[in-house]
Amino acid sequence: MSQEPYYRDTWAEINLSNIDFNIKQLRKHLKEETGIYAVVKANGYGHGDIQVAEQALESGADRLAVSLLDEAIKLRRAGMTCPILVMGWIRPEDAVVASEYDVAITVFQKEWFEQVETEKLKNPLNIHMKWDTGMGRIGIRTTEEMDAILNEIKKHPFFKLDAIFTHFATADEEDTSYYEEQERRLEELVNHLQKVWPEDVDIHSGNSAASMRFPDRMKQFIRFGISMYGLYPSGDVKKERPIELQPAFSLNSRLIHVKKVGPGESLSYGATYTTSETEWIGTVPVGYADGWIRKLQGFEVLVDGKRHPIVGRICMDQFMIRLDQEYSLGSKVTLIGKQNQEEVHMDDVAEHLETINYEIPCTISYRVPRMYIKHGHIVEVENSL
Ligand SMILES: *Cc1c(COP(=O)(O)O)cnc(C)c1O
Protein backbone atom coordinates (compact mmCIF):
# COMPACT_ATOMS: atom_id res chain seq x y z
CA MET A 1 0.00 0.00 0.00
CA SER A 2 1.28 3.44 -0.88
CA GLN A 3 0.06 6.73 0.51
CA GLU A 4 1.56 9.48 -1.58
CA PRO A 5 1.26 12.79 0.24
CA TYR A 6 -0.66 15.66 -1.32
CA TYR A 7 -0.88 19.27 -0.27
CA ARG A 8 -4.27 20.57 -1.26
CA ASP A 9 -7.79 20.43 0.16
CA THR A 10 -9.36 18.59 -2.74
CA TRP A 11 -9.53 14.85 -3.28
CA ALA A 12 -11.58 12.11 -4.93
CA GLU A 13 -12.56 9.05 -2.95
CA ILE A 14 -12.91 5.75 -4.76
CA ASN A 15 -14.76 3.17 -2.76
CA LEU A 16 -13.35 -0.19 -3.85
CA SER A 17 -15.88 -2.06 -1.71
CA ASN A 18 -18.61 -0.61 -3.92
CA ILE A 19 -16.84 -1.85 -7.04
CA ASP A 20 -16.74 -5.26 -5.38
CA PHE A 21 -20.47 -4.99 -4.64
CA ASN A 22 -21.34 -4.02 -8.23
CA ILE A 23 -19.38 -6.89 -9.77
CA LYS A 24 -20.95 -9.39 -7.39
CA GLN A 25 -24.44 -8.07 -8.18
CA LEU A 26 -23.84 -8.66 -11.88
CA ARG A 27 -22.17 -12.03 -11.25
CA LYS A 28 -25.35 -13.24 -9.51
CA HIS A 29 -27.38 -12.55 -12.66
CA LEU A 30 -25.01 -13.91 -15.28
CA LYS A 31 -24.95 -17.52 -16.35
CA GLU A 32 -22.25 -19.40 -14.49
CA GLU A 33 -20.19 -19.95 -17.65
CA THR A 34 -20.17 -16.29 -18.70
CA GLY A 35 -16.85 -14.59 -17.95
CA ILE A 36 -16.32 -10.90 -17.22
CA TYR A 37 -13.93 -8.44 -18.79
CA ALA A 38 -13.51 -5.49 -16.41
CA VAL A 39 -13.28 -2.43 -18.66
CA VAL A 40 -10.64 -0.10 -17.21
CA LYS A 41 -9.91 2.15 -20.19
CA ALA A 42 -9.35 5.88 -19.67
CA ASN A 43 -7.71 5.33 -16.28
CA GLY A 44 -10.64 3.21 -15.16
CA TYR A 45 -13.18 5.88 -16.23
CA GLY A 46 -11.14 8.29 -14.10
CA HIS A 47 -11.26 6.05 -11.01
CA GLY A 48 -7.71 4.67 -11.36
CA ASP A 49 -7.01 1.79 -13.75
CA ILE A 50 -4.63 -0.29 -11.65
CA GLN A 51 -6.59 -0.01 -8.42
CA VAL A 52 -9.88 -0.84 -10.14
CA ALA A 53 -8.29 -3.68 -12.11
CA GLU A 54 -6.89 -5.28 -8.96
CA GLN A 55 -10.22 -4.97 -7.19
CA ALA A 56 -12.18 -6.26 -10.17
CA LEU A 57 -10.02 -9.38 -10.51
CA GLU A 58 -10.36 -10.04 -6.79
CA SER A 59 -14.14 -9.59 -7.02
CA GLY A 60 -14.71 -12.08 -9.80
CA ALA A 61 -13.77 -10.42 -13.08
CA ASP A 62 -11.66 -12.75 -15.25
CA ARG A 63 -9.93 -10.40 -17.66
CA LEU A 64 -9.23 -6.73 -18.40
CA ALA A 65 -10.13 -4.60 -21.38
CA VAL A 66 -8.79 -1.17 -22.38
CA SER A 67 -8.84 1.01 -25.49
CA LEU A 68 -5.18 1.68 -26.12
CA LEU A 69 -2.05 -0.43 -26.26
CA ASP A 70 -0.39 2.08 -23.92
CA GLU A 71 -3.13 1.45 -21.35
CA ALA A 72 -2.59 -2.30 -21.62
CA ILE A 73 1.18 -1.98 -21.22
CA LYS A 74 0.68 0.15 -18.12
CA LEU A 75 -1.35 -2.69 -16.57
CA ARG A 76 1.26 -5.31 -17.53
CA ARG A 77 4.05 -3.18 -16.05
CA ALA A 78 2.02 -2.93 -12.85
CA GLY A 79 2.18 -6.71 -12.63
CA MET A 80 -1.18 -7.78 -14.06
CA THR A 81 -0.84 -11.28 -15.48
CA CYS A 82 -4.42 -11.99 -16.62
CA PRO A 83 -5.50 -11.73 -20.27
CA ILE A 84 -5.72 -8.09 -21.39
CA LEU A 85 -7.56 -6.94 -24.50
CA VAL A 86 -7.11 -3.69 -26.42
CA MET A 87 -10.58 -3.01 -27.86
CA GLY A 88 -9.51 -0.14 -30.14
CA TRP A 89 -7.46 -0.11 -33.34
CA ILE A 90 -3.76 -0.55 -32.97
CA ARG A 91 -1.19 0.34 -35.60
CA PRO A 92 0.15 -2.72 -37.45
CA GLU A 93 3.72 -1.62 -36.63
CA ASP A 94 2.84 -2.00 -32.93
CA ALA A 95 1.68 -5.62 -33.24
CA VAL A 96 5.12 -6.90 -32.26
CA VAL A 97 5.03 -4.85 -29.05
CA ALA A 98 1.55 -6.18 -28.28
CA SER A 99 2.79 -9.74 -28.65
CA GLU A 100 5.83 -9.05 -26.46
CA TYR A 101 3.51 -7.88 -23.69
CA ASP A 102 1.07 -10.72 -24.36
CA VAL A 103 -1.72 -8.24 -25.02
CA ALA A 104 -4.65 -9.35 -27.18
CA ILE A 105 -5.53 -6.93 -29.95
CA THR A 106 -8.49 -5.99 -32.10
CA VAL A 107 -8.28 -6.47 -35.86
CA PHE A 108 -10.84 -5.93 -38.63
CA GLN A 109 -8.92 -4.97 -41.76
CA LYS A 110 -7.30 -7.36 -44.19
CA GLU A 111 -4.68 -4.77 -45.20
CA TRP A 112 -3.60 -4.48 -41.58
CA PHE A 113 -1.87 -7.86 -41.75
CA GLU A 114 0.34 -6.86 -44.67
CA GLN A 115 2.08 -4.24 -42.55
CA VAL A 116 2.82 -6.43 -39.53
CA GLU A 117 6.55 -7.12 -39.24
CA THR A 118 6.01 -10.85 -38.87
CA GLU A 119 9.75 -11.59 -39.01
CA LYS A 120 10.09 -9.80 -35.65
CA LEU A 121 7.34 -11.81 -33.93
CA LYS A 122 8.72 -14.01 -31.18
CA ASN A 123 5.45 -14.71 -29.41
CA PRO A 124 1.90 -15.51 -30.48
CA LEU A 125 -0.32 -12.57 -31.35
CA ASN A 126 -3.80 -13.00 -29.88
CA ILE A 127 -6.37 -11.56 -32.21
CA HIS A 128 -9.95 -10.56 -31.49
CA MET A 129 -11.81 -9.96 -34.73
CA LYS A 130 -14.21 -7.03 -34.39
CA TRP A 131 -17.60 -7.29 -36.08
CA ASP A 132 -19.65 -4.21 -36.84
CA THR A 133 -23.24 -5.35 -36.42
CA GLY A 134 -24.67 -1.84 -36.28
CA MET A 135 -22.44 0.42 -34.24
CA GLY A 136 -20.85 1.69 -37.46
CA ARG A 137 -17.54 2.48 -35.81
CA ILE A 138 -14.97 -0.27 -36.37
CA GLY A 139 -15.34 -3.87 -37.47
CA ILE A 140 -16.05 -6.08 -40.45
CA ARG A 141 -19.57 -5.98 -41.85
CA THR A 142 -19.68 -8.88 -44.32
CA THR A 143 -18.78 -12.57 -44.49
CA GLU A 144 -16.40 -11.73 -47.39
CA GLU A 145 -14.40 -9.45 -45.11
CA MET A 146 -14.44 -12.16 -42.45
CA ASP A 147 -13.11 -14.76 -44.89
CA ALA A 148 -10.34 -12.44 -46.04
CA ILE A 149 -9.18 -11.90 -42.46
CA LEU A 150 -9.38 -15.60 -41.59
CA ASN A 151 -7.21 -16.20 -44.63
CA GLU A 152 -4.60 -13.76 -43.32
CA ILE A 153 -4.66 -15.38 -39.88
CA LYS A 154 -3.93 -18.77 -41.45
CA LYS A 155 -0.76 -17.40 -43.06
CA HIS A 156 1.32 -17.17 -39.92
CA PRO A 157 1.61 -19.69 -37.07
CA PHE A 158 1.86 -16.88 -34.50
CA PHE A 159 -1.49 -15.34 -35.52
CA LYS A 160 -4.11 -16.78 -33.18
CA LEU A 161 -7.80 -16.10 -33.48
CA ASP A 162 -8.77 -15.84 -29.83
CA ALA A 163 -12.24 -14.39 -30.10
CA ILE A 164 -14.69 -12.39 -32.14
CA PHE A 165 -16.68 -9.52 -30.69
CA THR A 166 -19.19 -6.82 -31.40
CA HIS A 167 -20.49 -3.73 -29.61
CA PHE A 168 -24.11 -2.62 -29.15
CA ALA A 169 -25.21 0.91 -29.97
CA THR A 170 -28.56 1.02 -28.17
CA ALA A 171 -28.48 -1.66 -25.47
CA ASP A 172 -29.30 1.04 -22.89
CA GLU A 173 -32.55 2.11 -24.58
CA GLU A 174 -36.02 1.00 -23.60
CA ASP A 175 -36.82 0.18 -27.22
CA THR A 176 -34.87 -3.01 -27.94
CA SER A 177 -35.56 -3.34 -31.68
CA TYR A 178 -32.16 -2.05 -32.89
CA TYR A 179 -30.41 -4.10 -30.22
CA GLU A 180 -32.21 -7.20 -31.45
CA GLU A 181 -31.25 -6.44 -35.03
CA GLN A 182 -27.61 -6.31 -33.95
CA GLU A 183 -28.01 -9.66 -32.18
CA ARG A 184 -29.52 -11.11 -35.35
CA ARG A 185 -26.56 -9.92 -37.45
CA LEU A 186 -24.19 -11.32 -34.85
CA GLU A 187 -25.88 -14.75 -35.12
CA GLU A 188 -25.57 -14.65 -38.92
CA LEU A 189 -21.85 -13.96 -38.72
CA VAL A 190 -21.38 -16.60 -36.01
CA ASN A 191 -23.13 -19.19 -38.21
CA HIS A 192 -20.79 -18.37 -41.06
CA LEU A 193 -17.71 -18.51 -38.83
CA GLN A 194 -18.69 -21.93 -37.50
CA LYS A 195 -18.95 -23.22 -41.06
CA VAL A 196 -15.55 -21.97 -42.20
CA TRP A 197 -13.40 -22.08 -39.04
CA PRO A 198 -12.84 -25.44 -37.40
CA GLU A 199 -11.58 -24.25 -34.00
CA ASP A 200 -13.62 -22.98 -31.09
CA VAL A 201 -13.59 -19.22 -30.85
CA ASP A 202 -14.91 -17.19 -27.92
CA ILE A 203 -17.56 -14.56 -28.47
CA HIS A 204 -18.11 -11.43 -26.42
CA SER A 205 -20.77 -8.84 -27.04
CA GLY A 206 -22.48 -7.34 -24.00
CA ASN A 207 -21.56 -4.02 -22.40
CA SER A 208 -22.98 -2.99 -18.99
CA ALA A 209 -26.46 -2.34 -20.36
CA ALA A 210 -26.80 -5.60 -22.30
CA SER A 211 -25.25 -7.78 -19.60
CA MET A 212 -27.48 -6.39 -16.84
CA ARG A 213 -30.67 -6.41 -18.89
CA PHE A 214 -30.24 -9.61 -20.88
CA PRO A 215 -27.86 -11.80 -18.83
CA ASP A 216 -29.24 -15.02 -20.32
CA ARG A 217 -28.37 -13.93 -23.86
CA MET A 218 -24.70 -13.24 -23.14
CA LYS A 219 -21.91 -15.21 -24.80
CA GLN A 220 -18.61 -16.48 -23.35
CA PHE A 221 -17.68 -13.05 -21.98
CA ILE A 222 -19.24 -9.67 -21.30
CA ARG A 223 -17.45 -6.33 -21.06
CA PHE A 224 -18.45 -4.54 -17.88
CA GLY A 225 -17.65 -0.84 -17.79
CA ILE A 226 -19.81 1.96 -16.42
CA SER A 227 -21.89 -0.15 -14.05
CA MET A 228 -18.84 -1.69 -12.41
CA TYR A 229 -18.27 1.89 -11.22
CA GLY A 230 -21.82 1.98 -9.85
CA LEU A 231 -23.48 4.08 -12.55
CA TYR A 232 -26.40 3.13 -14.80
CA PRO A 233 -25.66 3.42 -18.52
CA SER A 234 -28.78 5.53 -19.13
CA GLY A 235 -31.92 6.92 -17.56
CA ASP A 236 -33.92 4.07 -19.12
CA VAL A 237 -31.74 1.42 -17.46
CA LYS A 238 -31.78 3.37 -14.19
CA LYS A 239 -35.59 3.27 -14.24
CA GLU A 240 -35.55 -0.43 -15.03
CA ARG A 241 -32.90 -1.09 -12.34
CA PRO A 242 -32.00 -4.62 -13.47
CA ILE A 243 -29.49 -4.83 -10.60
CA GLU A 244 -28.62 -2.62 -7.63
CA LEU A 245 -25.47 -0.51 -7.98
CA GLN A 246 -23.38 1.58 -5.60
CA PRO A 247 -21.44 4.55 -7.04
CA ALA A 248 -17.73 4.29 -6.25
CA PHE A 249 -16.62 7.86 -6.95
CA SER A 250 -17.01 10.95 -4.80
CA LEU A 251 -15.34 14.34 -5.08
CA ASN A 252 -14.60 16.46 -2.05
CA SER A 253 -12.98 19.70 -1.03
CA ARG A 254 -12.96 22.16 1.87
CA LEU A 255 -13.85 25.80 2.37
CA ILE A 256 -10.60 27.74 2.23
CA HIS A 257 -12.16 31.18 2.67
CA VAL A 258 -15.46 32.36 4.16
CA LYS A 259 -16.61 35.97 4.17
CA LYS A 260 -19.63 38.16 4.70
CA VAL A 261 -20.37 40.30 1.67
CA GLY A 262 -22.72 43.27 1.64
CA PRO A 263 -25.48 43.77 -0.96
CA GLY A 264 -24.56 44.88 -4.47
CA GLU A 265 -21.08 43.34 -4.51
CA SER A 266 -19.94 41.29 -7.53
CA LEU A 267 -17.95 38.07 -7.63
CA SER A 268 -15.45 36.40 -9.97
CA TYR A 269 -14.42 37.03 -13.59
CA GLY A 270 -16.84 39.08 -15.59
CA ALA A 271 -18.61 40.15 -12.40
CA THR A 272 -21.55 38.02 -13.53
CA TYR A 273 -22.96 37.51 -10.03
CA THR A 274 -23.98 40.36 -7.74
CA THR A 275 -25.20 39.83 -4.19
CA SER A 276 -28.76 40.98 -3.59
CA GLU A 277 -28.44 41.13 0.18
CA THR A 278 -25.77 40.51 2.79
CA GLU A 279 -24.50 37.03 1.93
CA TRP A 280 -22.03 34.48 3.25
CA ILE A 281 -19.68 33.49 0.43
CA GLY A 282 -17.35 30.50 0.56
CA THR A 283 -14.38 29.81 -1.70
CA VAL A 284 -13.72 26.23 -2.83
CA PRO A 285 -10.26 25.34 -4.24
CA VAL A 286 -11.46 23.42 -7.30
CA GLY A 287 -11.62 24.73 -10.85
CA TYR A 288 -11.85 23.84 -14.48
CA ALA A 289 -8.26 22.60 -14.52
CA ASP A 290 -9.47 19.92 -12.11
CA GLY A 291 -12.26 19.03 -14.52
CA TRP A 292 -14.89 21.08 -12.69
CA ILE A 293 -15.78 22.90 -15.87
CA ARG A 294 -17.17 26.43 -16.26
CA LYS A 295 -20.57 25.17 -17.39
CA LEU A 296 -21.13 24.03 -13.79
CA GLN A 297 -21.79 27.64 -12.80
CA GLY A 298 -25.25 27.61 -11.20
CA PHE A 299 -24.94 23.96 -10.11
CA GLU A 300 -24.94 23.03 -6.42
CA VAL A 301 -22.51 21.43 -3.97
CA LEU A 302 -22.99 20.14 -0.42
CA VAL A 303 -21.84 21.78 2.81
CA ASP A 304 -23.19 20.60 6.15
CA GLY A 305 -25.55 18.18 4.37
CA LYS A 306 -27.24 21.01 2.44
CA ARG A 307 -27.13 22.18 -1.16
CA HIS A 308 -25.40 25.50 -1.87
CA PRO A 309 -25.28 27.18 -5.29
CA ILE A 310 -22.12 27.94 -7.24
CA VAL A 311 -22.13 31.70 -7.84
CA GLY A 312 -20.05 33.61 -10.36
CA ARG A 313 -17.77 32.10 -12.94
CA ILE A 314 -15.74 29.02 -12.14
CA CYS A 315 -12.03 29.86 -12.37
CA MET A 316 -9.14 27.58 -13.32
CA ASP A 317 -8.46 26.62 -9.69
CA GLN A 318 -11.32 27.96 -7.54
CA PHE A 319 -15.00 28.82 -7.40
CA MET A 320 -17.37 30.53 -4.99
CA ILE A 321 -20.59 29.34 -3.38
CA ARG A 322 -23.36 31.17 -1.56
CA LEU A 323 -23.66 29.77 1.95
CA ASP A 324 -26.85 29.81 4.02
CA GLN A 325 -24.84 30.87 7.10
CA GLU A 326 -21.28 31.22 8.30
CA TYR A 327 -19.20 28.03 8.24
CA SER A 328 -15.75 27.49 9.65
CA LEU A 329 -12.69 27.26 7.43
CA GLY A 330 -11.99 23.67 6.51
CA SER A 331 -15.67 22.67 6.39
CA LYS A 332 -16.08 19.75 4.00
CA VAL A 333 -17.54 20.50 0.58
CA THR A 334 -18.90 17.55 -1.40
CA LEU A 335 -19.10 18.15 -5.14
CA ILE A 336 -20.10 14.60 -6.04
CA GLY A 337 -21.39 12.21 -3.39
CA LYS A 338 -23.33 12.19 -0.14
CA GLN A 339 -23.42 14.28 3.01
CA ASN A 340 -25.87 12.97 5.59
CA GLN A 341 -29.18 12.45 3.74
CA GLU A 342 -28.35 14.72 0.83
CA GLU A 343 -26.64 13.55 -2.35
CA VAL A 344 -25.22 15.12 -5.48
CA HIS A 345 -25.21 12.15 -7.81
CA MET A 346 -22.90 11.82 -10.82
CA ASP A 347 -26.13 11.74 -12.87
CA ASP A 348 -27.08 15.19 -11.51
CA VAL A 349 -23.76 16.61 -12.70
CA ALA A 350 -24.23 14.95 -16.09
CA GLU A 351 -27.77 16.29 -16.39
CA HIS A 352 -26.66 19.85 -15.61
CA LEU A 353 -23.98 19.53 -18.30
CA GLU A 354 -26.39 17.90 -20.78
CA THR A 355 -24.12 14.92 -21.14
CA ILE A 356 -23.85 11.32 -19.87
CA ASN A 357 -22.42 10.21 -16.53
CA TYR A 358 -19.53 8.42 -18.32
CA GLU A 359 -18.00 11.77 -19.19
CA ILE A 360 -17.87 13.18 -15.67
CA PRO A 361 -15.29 11.04 -13.81
CA CYS A 362 -13.16 10.83 -16.98
CA THR A 363 -12.96 14.62 -16.89
CA ILE A 364 -11.80 14.93 -13.27
CA SER A 365 -8.16 15.60 -13.98
CA TYR A 366 -4.78 14.30 -12.83
CA ARG A 367 -4.57 17.28 -10.44
CA VAL A 368 -7.09 15.69 -8.09
CA PRO A 369 -5.49 13.05 -5.83
CA ARG A 370 -7.37 9.76 -5.60
CA MET A 371 -7.95 8.19 -2.20
CA TYR A 372 -8.93 4.51 -2.18
CA ILE A 373 -11.31 3.22 0.48
CA LYS A 374 -11.96 -0.43 1.27
CA HIS A 375 -14.12 -1.71 4.12
CA GLY A 376 -14.22 1.87 5.44
CA HIS A 377 -10.43 2.33 5.57
CA ILE A 378 -8.03 4.28 3.38
CA VAL A 379 -5.91 1.67 1.61
CA GLU A 380 -4.05 3.87 -0.86
CA VAL A 381 -3.58 7.48 -1.88
CA GLU A 382 -2.38 8.32 -5.36
CA ASN A 383 -1.17 11.79 -6.27
CA SER A 384 -0.35 12.10 -9.97
CA LEU A 385 1.42 15.43 -9.55
C1 LIG B 1 -16.17 1.14 -23.28
C2 LIG B 1 -16.55 -0.11 -23.93
C3 LIG B 1 -17.30 -1.07 -23.22
C4 LIG B 1 -17.88 -0.82 -21.86
O1 LIG B 1 -19.13 -0.19 -22.02
P1 LIG B 1 -20.00 0.22 -20.74
O2 LIG B 1 -21.22 0.82 -21.32
O3 LIG B 1 -19.18 1.22 -19.99
O4 LIG B 1 -20.24 -1.00 -19.96
C5 LIG B 1 -17.53 -2.29 -23.85
N1 LIG B 1 -17.07 -2.53 -25.10
C6 LIG B 1 -16.39 -1.62 -25.81
C7 LIG B 1 -15.93 -1.96 -27.18
C8 LIG B 1 -16.10 -0.38 -25.25
O5 LIG B 1 -15.44 0.53 -25.98
Image (tube, rainbow, N blue to C red):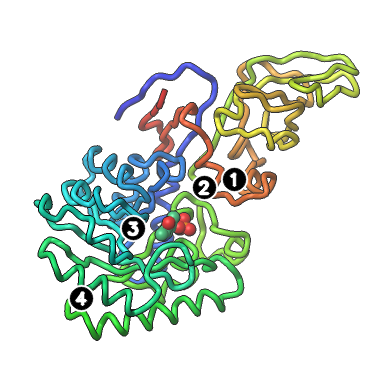
Inspect the image, locate mark 2, and give the three-letter code of the amino acid beneath it.
Answer: Pro
Q: Give the spatial CA distance, label 4 vs label 2.
A: 37 Å
Name the side, left or right, on which 379 lies relative to 307. Answer: left
In the picture, the disc for residue 276 is none
Q: Residue at x 35, y 24 (%)?
A: 3
Circle 4: element type: loop
Mark 4 and mark 1 lie on one chain; the one further toward the N terminus is 4
* Residue named by callout 2: 247
* Residue named by callout 3: 37
In contact (CB < 8 Å): disc 4 and disc 1: no
Q: Nearer the viewer, mark 4 or mark 2?
A: 4
Q: Residues within 10 Å of mark 4 (few under 14, many from 20)?
A: few
Q: Give the spatial CA distance, label 2 vs label 3.
A: 19 Å
| Residue behind label 3 places its C-beta within 8 angstroms of ligand 1 | yes
Asked whether the viewer can see residue 32, the reply is no
Q: Residues within 10 Å of mark 2 (few under 14, many from 20)?
A: many
> Could you say which is closer to the camera, residue 275 or residue 243?
275
In contact (CB < 8 Å): disc 1 and disc 2: yes
Q: Give the spatial CA distance, label 4 vs label 1.
A: 41 Å
* Residue named by callout 1: 346
Q: Position of residue 80 (x, y in %)?
A: 23, 45
> Could you say which is closer to the camera, residue 326 or residue 312?
312
> Could you say which is closer to the camera, residue 354 or residue 286?
354
Q: In the displayed structure, would residue 118 be above or below residue 286?
A: below
> Quadrant of the rendered structure where residue 160 is?
bottom left
Q: Give the spatial CA distance, label 1 vs label 2.
A: 8 Å
Inspect the image, locate mark 3, and give the three-letter code of the amino acid beneath it.
Answer: Tyr
| Residue behind label 4 places its C-beta within 8 angstroms of ligand 1 | no
In contact (CB < 8 Å): disc 1 and disc 3: no
Circle 2: element type: loop
